[in-house]
Image: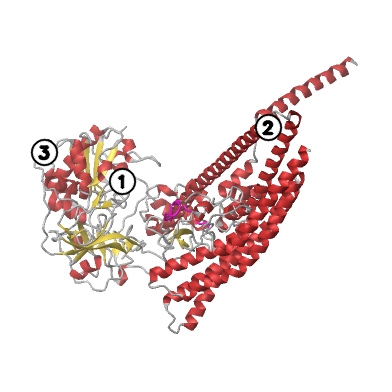
Amino acid sequence: MTTLLFALIALGSLALIFGLALGYASIRFKVDEDPIVEQIDQILPQTQCGQCGYPGCKPYAKAIADGDEINKCPPGGDATIKKLADLLGREAKPLNDAHDGPDIKRVAFIREDECIGCTKCIQACPVDAIVGATRQMHTVIADECTGCDLCVAPCPVDCIDMLPVQPTIQTWQWQMQSIPVKVVDAND
Amino acid sequence: MIDVKKLLTSDQLWDYAGGVFPEYRKEQSRQLPIQPAWIPPFVRVPIRQHIGQSGNLIVKVGDHVLKGQLLTEPTHGMAVPVHAPTSGIVEAIGQTPSNHPSGLNEISLTIRTDGLDTWCERKPVADASTLSDNDLLQLIRYAGISGMGGAGFPTEIKLTPVNPIELLLINGAECEPYISADDTLMQALAEQVVAGIELMARLLNNPVVIIAIEADKPKAIAAMEQACADWEQVRVRTIPAKYPSGGERQLIQIITGQEVPSNGIPADLGVVVHNVGTAYAVARAVYQDEPLIARVVTITGNRVLKPANHWVLLGTPIDALLHHHGLDQLDPVIVGGPMMGYQLPHAEAPVIKTTNCLIIPSQDELPSADRQMPCIRCGSCAEACPANLLPQQLHWYALAEDQDKLNEHNLFDCIECGACAYVCPSEIPLVLEYRQAKAMIRSSRQEQLKAERAKQRFEARNERLEQEKQARAEKHKKAAEARLKAMADKPSSSASESSPDSATKQSAAVAAALARAKAKKASQQPQKTMIDAAGQTVPDNSDVAAMREARKAEARAKKAQKQSSSASGNGASDKSAAVAAAVARAKAKRQAQASSTEPDAQQPLAATASNAADDKAARVAAAVARAKAKRDAAQHSDAKPAVTAPSEEQPAADDKAARVAADVARAKAKRQAQQATDTDQKPQPTSAAEPAQDKAARIAQAVAKAKAKRAQQAAQDDSEQ
């Protein structure tokens, strides 16, 4: 009988200790946010364009974590889908058919002599990449523009174009058919 | 660290793994003398000819420039200036084909030469010991000197290292086939090269100097040994001819036996490597005050009748240069050596600071490019690699675009020497694959950085908007409190006589104010969501979709407009067409906007209905106002075409006026559309600048307001009783 009692006491006290430890840990090491959301957000291109149907990249990351499709991000394209598929262990799908946007990078460009200075595009820009003031000409900081095209619709005089980014010598990707790297033959 | 004293006495040399022994083919071009410079009819000077940024342009089109005159000002650290290579007039500044494998355009100055070759004012320094180190460095910086060996790193930066330097290694290896520019320079101008080395050594606090020259250049070795015979700290070393011994890291390993760490630079070992051409340029800059405006270029290849080394003014167009030397058929031209060089996409590109060789090969000198076979995993490439990499693994990973694996296999340690591609029996263009893979990894890193920055900006913006919203709410709250207080004060003075009623009176006033505020807020909401749709912290997605839809509709309208205008095209003037297009665009936009605002308009109604339950009077007033405004809005939409029509009929005097008119018309149309929706939400008088047909709406608003006031009064009276 005493053996049983001891066993019960021992087990009970152990349960209590672990319970306390776990309880403490759950408070002390509480994770506010699902870490997977952060990881998904890292992969998304952060254009904040809303083409996925969510108001930004973070909300879409949350939606993906909650089970939404991973193929709704046109700016990211297939590369992003592939990375997401790898991360989440899901199957990579082709880009959602609803989007038919071109795959090339674009930046907004304001035709400055037509701008009337209404500031509507400034309010629309999710990354504050447009500078200007009321009744002053506006312009786009091309380096900060994510190419989300949210500024195009609000413009009352339609002076914003989305121009494809031209490659420079620094960004060139060595796309060429072939170069004669090897032109000398030691044996002839 | 390295025992540098031993290096001066010991005969030991080390070897690095790998390397290849291609046929050198230098004999044809290495004979003296170096041909003098030719002044072409025009030169094209790119403003950036090195690694780093360009300086700021300080001349403009039409300026007359003299030989050696500064064209750009180096304003920041990695900037190197460029100079006019001869006297002439700046004809153009703009995008012209670059001397780069991409052949993309870059900004350059086109100078029409006058043939006089007039120097600008020069201040040669006879005795360099009178100059301070800082003055000397500035002199080198303003002479536009960057590494002449290949990479083009700013020389001044390499001469002010962070670590103490114990060994200055002068690279005269010139290991690549065909090239003999450094060889002939050392043969002909050894004294000046050594003078430059002395200046460099002085700036580096007199380290031990080793001049490394490959064994196949006996004349250059003899000339250099003679030139530095009476200098103790220096030694000329003959190294075996093997490719790529002239690589910076390989050369350090041959001379010192030590390897530069993977992510390090030679300065980590206390070593700095400079090219002989750079040393010569330093001497010229100091003792002749001659900036870097010309260099030795080897022009060789089987199609060249007299292969030789030439002084070439920087900026000389390559096609003109070759034409001058009797070469007309210019395809292909290889810039640099056959191992690391590239085929020039546009022959009109200029000679720049790093151009050491031009090869114009005959047909049989070049293997055809399409003999590539699959990799057979023979491993020859791994044996040839001087950087101890595994080229075949890199080949597979590059094909698979596997960035992680490429980094794991140290792709970025690849010096792109081409030894692997040279030995490959399947003739796989390995180096091209590595270059593409490197570019891919670099651009994805860039994108990562950009995404990170975009995220930060997006979050900062949201935070700011949130703060502004709170500040606004705070302000409104304070204003409301102030109003309440004022109201409470007023009745209390009168209520002091009839005290029992004052409490109920006050609460009634509060209730009325709250109701008013609520009604106002509810009626303002839709307009706000419409304007802010895209910019709000949590924008309405239906709005975004609607906007996209609107743009599509607009594009359709534009297209239709274009078609109709091109179809009619019977002499209708440009101006009226532009006006018509603007009107069409505005119409399309308005339509889309109307459709997008309709669902929003429903929201406030419901909201008001539920919110205002606690205040009957306010609800009634709002309903009346809404109904009236709606009717007015209907009237407006009828009136709209009438306003836009006149602008269509009267074409403006000139193009600009037409554009302004179009803008105004568009803005007007848009504003009206907005007002049509505004009026049923905002029961308060708007600005006096409104068009005449708004009068009805204003009257309606006034009536609504009056009614609301009366109703409120009634409510107050009710509660008083």
Please check the rendered image and state whether residue B343 is part of the magenta-colored stretch, yes or no.
Answer: no
Q: Nearer the viewer, residue B684 or B178?
A: B684
- Quarter of the image for the C terminus of chain B: give it: top right
Q: Disc number at residue B78? A: 1
**Residue behind mark 3:** B230
Q: Disc number at residue B441? A: none
**Residue B673 relative to residue B84: left or right:** right
What secondary structure is the stretch in magenta mostly built from? loop
Q: Where is residue B348 shown, x and y percent of the image?
A: 27, 67
Q: Residue furthest front?
A: B497
Marks 1/2: CA–CA distance: 79 Å
Tell me the subunit letter for badge 3.
Answer: B
Q: Residue at x 21, y 50 (%)?
A: B277
Q: Where is residue B631 shown, x and y percent of the image?
A: 67, 63
Write down the quadrant of residue B472 in the picture: top right
Q: Are marks 1 and 2 in contact (CB under 8 Å)?
A: no
Q: Disc number at residue B494? A: 2
Few, some or many residues within 10 Å of mark 3 (<14, 14–19, 20+): few
The nearer-to-camera label among 3 and 2 is 2
Marks 3/2: CA–CA distance: 112 Å
Q: Is residue B198 above or below residue B528?
A: above
Q: Amino acid at mark 1?
A: Met
Precedes in sequence: disc 3 or disc 2? 3
Q: Residue furthest top?
A: A2
The nearer-to-camera label among 1 and 2 is 2
